[in-house]
Image (tube, coloured by chain):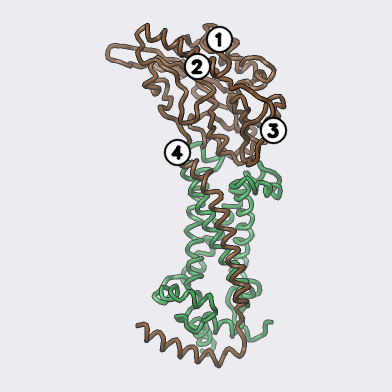
Chain colours: A green, B brown
Amino acid sequence: MSNKDDIRRYKDGERLHHWIVAVTFILLAMSGLALFHPSLYWLTNLFGGGQWTRILHPFIGLVMFVSVMVLMVRFWRHNLVNRDDLRWIRYLPDALHKREGRLPPVGRYNAGQKIIYWSTVIGMFLLLFSGLIMWQPYFAPVFPIGLVRFAILVHAFSAILLMMVIILHIYAAIWVKGSLQAMVKGTVSRTWAKKHHPLWYREVTQEERK
Amino acid sequence: MASMQSLDIKNRSATSLPSPSVRSHTELAKLIDVSKCIGCKACQVACMEWNDLRGPVGENTGVYDNPQDLNEHTWTLMRFSEVEPDDFSFEWLIRKDGCMHCDDPGCLKACPAPGAIVQYANGIVDFISEKCIGCGYCIAGCPFDIPRLSRADNRAYKCTLCSDRVAVGLEPACVTTCPTGCITFGTKEDMKQQAVLRIADLNSRGYDNAGLYDPPGVGGTHVMYVLQHADRPGLYHGLPEDPRISPMVGFWQGITKPLAIGALALLAMASFLHFIKHGPNVAEEDDDAPSRDKTRDRKEESSHVE
């Protein structure tokens, strides 16, 4: 599907970090859900049983947090919210009906992607702090029980919200053909860029002309 | 210890279907008459002996409490409180602290490991240590701050009400050893009746507020106290006045679970429906020409909006 004319969208390091986040997220979601809902406790078998699930989850969480922080530093500039983003949200039904022509001009990321970016970053901070407070046996004993209870609740809620955001993220990547290639090979086709990120496409082509 | 087959299970952690329950058991309870306690700690010793618990030697910090707090080796602990309940009066209140065996146990509700905490039909709440995963949720769930996590094996421990002895018709070790008859054991009904007699006696001795501690907020308990000052349980080393499962724990283990799983499933389903309705979003080569038109459309429309 790709050819020499494709545009570079992600460097090797960026893709590597993205996939570290992706793999750790899947592991965390599975181990976390296993300890959240009794019907999903069987998922602990994938991690070597209940004790191992409880041991591994927080350490995998630290890896994910650090990788998300790296992604945050790499991409924050592209995810600053502007006026067009606010308008884009209002045109969301058009986006969902593939009427891209009606959407406000989109740069490197559209408003939906920016929402996913920022909710992941905020979610990771909430999960880190609440996770540390409830982490047995290292940290939980030093905190008052009331705070641990609150942290457990915050952890559950932010995890579920993050999972919802990631479901949307994964679906968007499946739905918008040509997106996956950006994270696998690092390139996108010109037609893809023109259609989904016209402002970014203009930037890139202007760079090329220089 | 595995579950006692001779004791039927009423509640099992992280389990939605009922457990075997054909045998009929009467509810049992331990009654601790604080007014009769002399603080000899024989119950503490009996508990260690029966359960083979040997903690490290502690430190003397100038008070009688030894060790300072419950721990994985100390499932019951004498708490000594010097209080002045009224002006010009002084009392030394000694309470045998430990698991209260709530009828609505917060530990069991919070536990994520199926069958790691069970409640027998006779009311005893027991930790099945081999299934414990060491997450400490029971500690967060308990309204009495009882379970303790062992750093050696990462499992939570607490008083079992000697479920192994009770299963074969014996009373708990602490009851057998108590030299003053302060601790008694029997059916919950009998214990309540005995408490009535004790409270009448205390009333006649000037303790007008003597009463039974069987807090309804946790459905009642299977370890009950007779207190000289039942109106102020806090005097007894901070015994909670109206213990109940924290609303945060109830919310987390209650409505949050089905709601969260439902939301995830719904979103995944909605995504799938969107896909089969609208199909993949493909950027085609011949999008080029029409897209210019679309750009013009957009400009017109946006000027229209503004």
- Kind of residue at badge 3: Pro
Residue A204 vertical placement versus B102 (above, below): below
For marks 2 and 1, give the one nearer the viewer: 2
For marks 2 and 4, give the one nearer the viewer: 2
- Kind of residue at badge 2: Lys
Q: Which chain carries label 3?
A: B
Q: Mark 2 lies on which chain?
A: B
Considering only order in the chain, which callout, 1 or 2, is on the residue closer to the N terminus?
1
Residue that appears at 62% across and 66% down: A16
| Mark number, residue B178 | 1
The x and y percentages for residue B133 are 64, 39
| Mark number, residue B192 | 2
Q: Which chain carries label 1?
A: B
What is the secondary structure assignment of the residue under circle 4? Answer: helix
Residue identified by numbered label 3: B20
Number of other residues with Cα within 10 Å of mark 1, as a class: few under 14, some 14 to 19, many 20 or more: some
Residue A184 vertical placement versus B6 (above, below): below
User: Is label 3 on the same chain as label 4?
Assistant: no
Number of other residues with Cα within 10 Å of mark 3, as a class: few under 14, some 14 to 19, many 20 or more: few
In 3D space, how far apart are the residues under numbered discs 2 and 1 (Cα atoms)?
A: 19 Å
In 3D space, how far apart are the residues under numbered discs 3 and 2 (Cα atoms)?
A: 28 Å
Where, by quadrant of the figure, is residue A66 drawn?
bottom right
Residue A81 vertical placement versus B111 (above, below): below
